[in-house]
Image: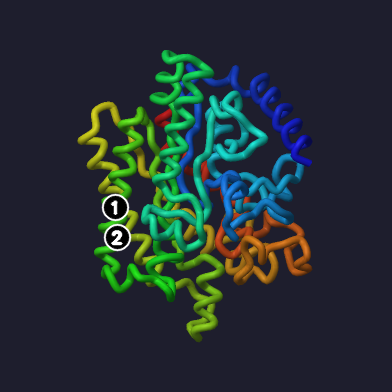
Amino acid sequence: MEANYKFISCLIIIFVQLIIIPCVVGGKVPAIIVFGDSSVDAGNNNQISTVLKSNFEPYGRDFYGKMPTGRFCNGRIPPDFISEAFGLRPFVPAYLDPMFNITDFAGGVCFASAGTGYDNATSQVLSVIPLWKEIENYKEYQKKLEAYVGSKKVKYIIQEALYLVSLGTNDFLENYYSIQSKRASQFTIEQYQGFLIELAENFIKQIYQLGARKISFTGLPPMGCLPLERATNIIRGHGDACNEKYNDCALRFNVMLNGLVDKLNRELPGMKMVFSNPYELILQIIRNPSSFGFEVAGVACCGTGLFEMSYLCDKLNPLTCTDANKYVFWDSFHLSQKTNLIITNFLMKNVLNQFL
């Protein structure tokens, strides 16, 4: 199966090189480099000891070759679509995936780990890769890339690449607001948001020092409207409405992230950083799914659509939907491929187009 994945991947790369790249002028972005959580993880968690995995069916059933790659989706995730939009491959491989090597990573690589956050304590909840380790893997990647392409070209790739940074939801839902959280006793929510902003600033400055200059910083979604949170609301006797406390938290944090982007653009010479905020679009899709071609927004495609994700979302569940394109969410925590594409098209048109 893995051999078929590699073969299909090679065919895709050849096709993209023949058909898409000639249409791109200048090649302003030679690679897509990804940091973050499950919203952008292409399969790094497959290679670590954690319960948070998705390298099994029905995950990936709409991906190339119907392969479960470790993406928390029925198909592709935003970095894959963004890479394709920039004339690169239609997917970004995971750095820890043994099926790929530096020849594949030269055009894009993903260091993200599902379940992680800005806060190291968040990554400890499900024993996933902390953000500092993602940076260490990136440093290792730079050394391998220099050995492969040479010192002159590696500098070009690192400085001209587009960096996608997407995380933060787990810091709140899996850490601060969880029953076992210690952070809630240490910080008010406003203090914790400020703490995360400091960590985010430190992270950006670290990758800036390592050469990053073009960065897309992704905001939080309306996390109170995730099917899992709506199901929890039902259990608590609040109906199936979105958890507005969580949504308000995301809104406030997004304002702070946007302010951080403005601050770092002023302070760091040569920095070109944008704030990619999906909040309002996702909320519109959830409130008016039919306007975007969806039929279901309150529950997910997999299983009952209320609480299944990772190992609870498996091929033995007879309740999983047959057509994920009708659903806004694939599992109780993650968007479907169709939703990911709609979000990517919006960001490419309104935010990321300045990097074309």
Does the CB distance between marks 2 and 1 fall below 8 Å?
yes
Of residue 209 and residue 91, the one placed in the foreground of this image is 209
Residue 76: image location, x then y, percent: 62, 44
Give, as a three-letter code, the residue at label 1. Answer: Ile
Give, as a three-letter code, the residue at label 2. Answer: Gln
Classed neighbour count for the residue bearing mark 1: other residues with Cα under 10 Å, few (<14), some (14–19), many (≥20): some
* Residue located at (35% from left, 39% from top): 274
Residue 13: image location, x then y, percent: 67, 26
Q: Is residue 219 above or below residue 99?
A: below
Task: Compute the Cα span from label 2 to label 1.
Answer: 6 Å
* Residue located at (55% from left, 37% from top): 95
Q: Secondary structure at mark 2?
A: helix
Q: Is residue 102 left or right of residue 276?
A: right
* Residue located at (62% from left, 54% from top): 336
User: Farthest residue toward the bottom?
Assistant: 237
Q: Is residue 146 above or below residue 79?
A: above
* Residue located at (52% from left, 73% from top): 230
Of residue 260 and residue 354, the one placed in the foreground of this image is 260
Rendered-image quadrant of the N terminus: top right
Residue 182 position by quadrant: bottom left
Return the residue at label 1.
Answer: 197
Return the residue at label 2.
Answer: 193
